[in-house]
Every structure is written in C-alpha cells, then in structure tokens.
C-alpha cells in the first residue's frame, strides 16, 4: 500500500476522546486530527511521538487530517489506523503473500455468520476446498520486547473466538490472522495479564482446530515516500 499524496509528519501533544488528537504541524501551528482507533493504543500515543498523517480531499470533513502511523521516540513505526489492517491483509491475499491462504478462487468481505450474529473479515471459497473463515486482528502492543494481543479487555474479540470455534465444529476451516503492525514486534503472544478470558478462549480455539497465524508488515515513511505492506510470517506463541 502506497499513500498518495505521501504522509506528512507532526508532533503529538495528546490523544483524547478516543477519536481525536492534538498535534503540532511542521510549520509549528497546532491542530486537531481524527484517530481511527477505538483501542487503548498503549505505547502508540506518547507525547512528543511523531505522527504521520494523511489528508482528506473531502471539504465536508470537520477534521481533514487522519493519524495513520506513529514513529516512537525509540524509532519504532506503528500503524494505528485500524482500518488499514484489513486493507493490508486483502492486498496480501491477492498477492499470495500468506502461504496458508492461497489457492482460493473467490474472496468475500464482511460476511455474516455464526450464532452470535458476527461478520467475518474474509470468507475464502473454492470448489475444491473447505470454506475458510478468516478473522483479522491488528497487533500493536509491545511490552518488554514481546508483542501482545489484545491491548485491553475485548468482549468483541471473545465473541469472535467463540464464532470461529463454531465454524470448526461445523466442519469448515477457521483462521485467526494477527496482522503485526509494529516494527518492534518479532512474535505474538496473548496478553493474559490484560484479558484472561480471551486467553482461555484462545486455548480452547487452538484445541478445537482454529488455525492461528501471524504476519508482519514492513513500513517506510519519509517526506517523499510512505508505504506499508504485509511481508512475512512471525511466530505465534500459545
């Protein structure tokens, strides 16, 4: 994924009300931008971090700038716009980067499924294969050198695990795909210390036959080029 026009840098003052952040632009003016992330953003939103933002051409938008990435003071790059995870995974699926999910003839997005009325991120189908349900989760939490998911209690994520278990029980294929969008993360574990219920459900899902994989994105940000793409697998540690 290449951003056109290229992203621009600003300096973070603070994030607040979940969807807003105040920043200082390169001309030293201060403004407010939109934050497309409902999570805790732990470690991704420290004052004085560099914010890389996109600019909307829509004149009706109240906040034309959108926070896309954080460049931390230790020079890690993090994609904080949660909308991008599915876009990146779809691009990777089309380019056959994810070896575990190749050989399908049809891809559908946001398909309703399950007894709890969920929507699967991607449904992959082919006449010669089982229907494959792919749930995507973005990983951005780094603690003491280890990547973790989730970064807070996620009842929605718990529901998705129950739905994936049900998929397997119905004889179809279920895949939980962690999109690692933090340059400092080399492997993924479940944050049992933050959401023990999610951890218990992961163990149950793994035992039931839900496949759990993790792929990491490469990111490049300069004032002339802004790109991100899912590039290679990393370990998931149960």
Image (cartoon, rainbow, N blue to C red):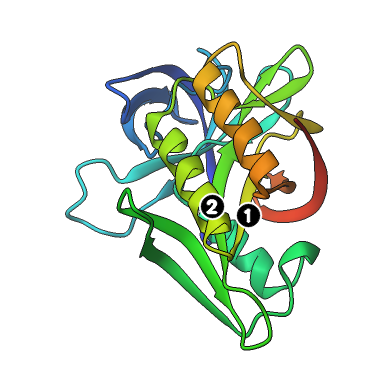
Q: Residues within 10 Å of mark 1 (few under 14, many from 20)?
A: many
Asked whether residue 120 is in view, the answer is yes
- Dot 1 corresponds to which residue? 175
Residue 90 in the image: x percent, y percent?
Answer: 58, 65
Quarter of the image with the C terminus in it: top right
SS at mark 1 in the image: strand
**In the image, 142: left or right of 26?**
right
1 vs 166: above or below: below
Of the pair 62 and 138, the residue shown nearer to us: 138
Residue 67 in the image: x percent, y percent?
Answer: 44, 38
Of the pair 88 and 161, the residue shown nearer to us: 161
Residue 137 in the image: x percent, y percent?
Answer: 55, 43
Task: Place residue 160 in its image quadrant.
Answer: top left
Task: Place residue 74 in its image quadrant.
Answer: top right
141 vs 138: above or below: above
Quarter of the image with the N terminus in it: bottom right
**In the image, 144: left or right of 63?**
right
Of the pair 39 and 206, the residue shown nearer to us: 206
């Amino acid at each position: 994924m290449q951003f056109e026009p290229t992203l621009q840098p600003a300096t973070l003052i603070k994030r607040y009300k979940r969807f807003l952040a105040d920043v200082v632009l390169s001309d030293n003016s201060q403004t407010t931008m939109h934050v497309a992330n409902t999570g805790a953003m732990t470690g991704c939103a420290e004052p004085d971090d560099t914010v890389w933002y996109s600019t909307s051409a829509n004149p009706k938008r109240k906040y034309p700038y959108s926070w896309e990435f954080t460049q931390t003071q230790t020079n890690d790059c993090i994609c904080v716009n949660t909308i991008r995870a599915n876009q990146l995974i779809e691009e990777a699926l089309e380019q056959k980067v994810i070896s575990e999910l190749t050989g399908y003839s049809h891809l559908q997005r946001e398909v309703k499924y399950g007894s709890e009325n969920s929507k699967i991120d991607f449904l992959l189908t082919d006449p010669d294969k089982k229907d494959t349900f792919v749930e995507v989760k973005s990983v951005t939490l780094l603690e003491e050198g280890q990547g973790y998911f989730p970064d807070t209690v996620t009842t929605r994520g718990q529901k998705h695990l129950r739905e994936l278990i049900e998929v397997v029980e119905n004889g179809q294929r279920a895949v939980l795909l962690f999109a690692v969008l933090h340059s400092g993360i080399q492997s993924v574990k479940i944050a049992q210390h933050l959401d023990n219920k999610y951890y218990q459900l992961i163990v149950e899902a793994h035992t039931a036959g839900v496949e759990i994989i993790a792929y990491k994105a490469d990111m490049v940000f300069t004032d002339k080029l802004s790109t991100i793409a899912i590039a290679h697998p990393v370990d998931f540690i149960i």
